[in-house]
Image: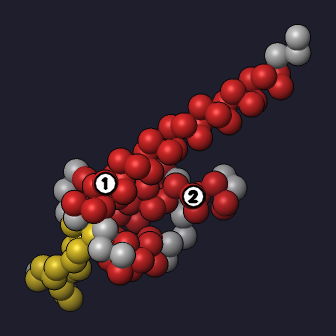
């Protein structure tokens, strides 16, 4: 998949994942990579930016197997952003599909 396509939707995907519950970075990256080809370090800059902009917050949880894990939770502002991005994405898909199918259907 084109890297520019991915960049536009990864932030939305991360927020949508966090809507279903708190997660740590590796868990988010692992689940995303099952559906979208991403490199290992892709998710962490997104999480840092979302935290800096107050769309997510984080907390540490002790891990029995090593260092504490940093969990991320979505904030109310993050839920609003997720809803907005999802609506924009749906509208974008509709417009692109209309363009594609118009071009394929010569009249």
Front residue of 9/38: it is 9
Crowd around label 1: few <14 · some 14–19 · many ≥20 (10 Å): some
Q: Residue at x 54, y 37 (%)?
A: 91
Question: In the image, which is nearer the foreground, mark 1 or mark 2?
Answer: 1
Point 36% across, 57% down: residue: 81
Question: Picture coordinates of residue 5 (x, y %)?
Answer: 63, 54
In this image, 107 relative to 20: left or right? right
Residue 39's quadrant in the figure?
bottom right
Q: Is residue 107 above or below residue 32?
A: above
* Position in image of residue 67 (x %, y %): 20, 88
Residue 1, x across and y down, in percent: 66, 52
Q: Is residue 35 above or below residue 45?
A: above
Q: Considering depth in this image, is 8 or 84 the residue closer to the camera?
A: 84
Q: Which residue is mark 1?
A: 80
Please name whichever residue, 87 or 13, is drawn nearer the observer in this view of the structure. 87
Q: Is residue 68 visible?
A: yes
Q: Mark 2 or mark 1, which is nearer the start of the sequence? A: 2
Residue at 82% x, 22% y is: 104
- When the figure is inspected, residue 88 is found, relative to residue 49, above or below; the finding is above
Where on the picture, by quarter, is residue 2? bottom right
Query: Which residue bears the numbered disc 2?
Result: 8
């Amino acid at each position: 998949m084109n890297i520019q396509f991915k960049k536009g939707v990864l932030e939305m995907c991360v927020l949508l994942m966090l809507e279903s519950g708190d997660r740590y970075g590796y868990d988010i990256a692992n689940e995303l990579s099952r559906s979208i080809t991403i490199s290992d370090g892709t998710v962490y800059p997104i999480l840092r930016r979302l935290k800096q902009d107050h769309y997510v917050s984080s907390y540490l949880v002790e891990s029995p197997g090593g260092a504490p894990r940093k969990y991320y939770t979505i904030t109310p502002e993050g839920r609003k952003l997720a809803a907005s991005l999802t609506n924009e994405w749906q509208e974008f898909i509709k417009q692109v599909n209309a363009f594609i199918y118009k071009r394929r259907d010569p009249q």
